[in-house]
Amino acid sequence: MAEKKAFVLRVSPAMLKELEAWAQEDFRSVNGQIEYLLSEALKKRKRGRGKAPEEGA
């Protein structure tokens, strides 16, 4: 596995609480949940490239 780069992420206490609950539901750490969500968002973004922009977007 490639080396991972650490960085600081600032979120509100309310957002952190929601992320903690979501991560627990998915049996992940908060870090793992954030990494998963970012990975899924990047995959979705790559799939969407080359398509015409949606109306109203």
Image (cartoon, rainbow, N blue to C red):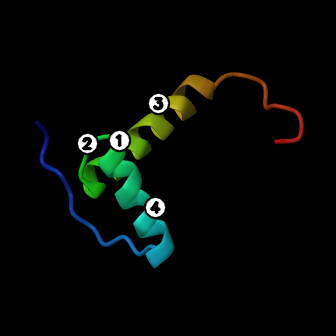
Number of other residues with Cα within 10 Å of mark 4, as a class: few under 14, some 14 to 19, many 20 or more: few
Q: Secondary structure at mark 2?
A: loop
- State the quadrant of the C terminus: top right
**Mark 4 and mark 2 in contact (Cβ < 8 Å)?**
no
Q: Secondary structure at mark 3?
A: helix
Left or right of 38 on screen, residue 24: left
* Image location of residue 18, percent across then percent down: 46, 61
Q: What is the distance, in whole Å, between disc 3 and disc 4 at their CAs?
A: 23 Å
Q: What is the distance, in whole Å, between disc 1 and disc 3 at their CAs?
A: 11 Å
Q: What is the distance, in whole Å, between disc 3 and disc 2 at their CAs?
A: 22 Å
Relative to 12, residue 46 above or below = above
Kindly identify which residue carries mark 3: 43
The residue at the point 35 percent across, 60 percent down is 20
Residue 6: quadrant of the picture: bottom left
Mark toward the viewer: 1 or 2: 2
Which mark is first along the chain, 4 or 1?
4
Which mark is first along the chain, 2 or 3?
2
The kind of residue on which mark 1 rests is Tyr
Kindly identify which residue carries mark 2: 27
The kind of residue on which mark 3 rests is Lys
Kindly identify which residue carries mark 4: 18
Q: What is the distance, in whole Å, between disc 2 and disc 4 at their CAs?
A: 14 Å
Relative to 48, residue 29 above or below = below
Residue sitting at the far right: 56
Q: Nearer the viewer, residue 39 or 21?
A: 21
What numbered label is drawn on residue 36? Answer: 1
Left or right of 24 on screen, residue 43: right
**Mark 4 and mark 1 in contact (Cβ < 8 Å)?**
no
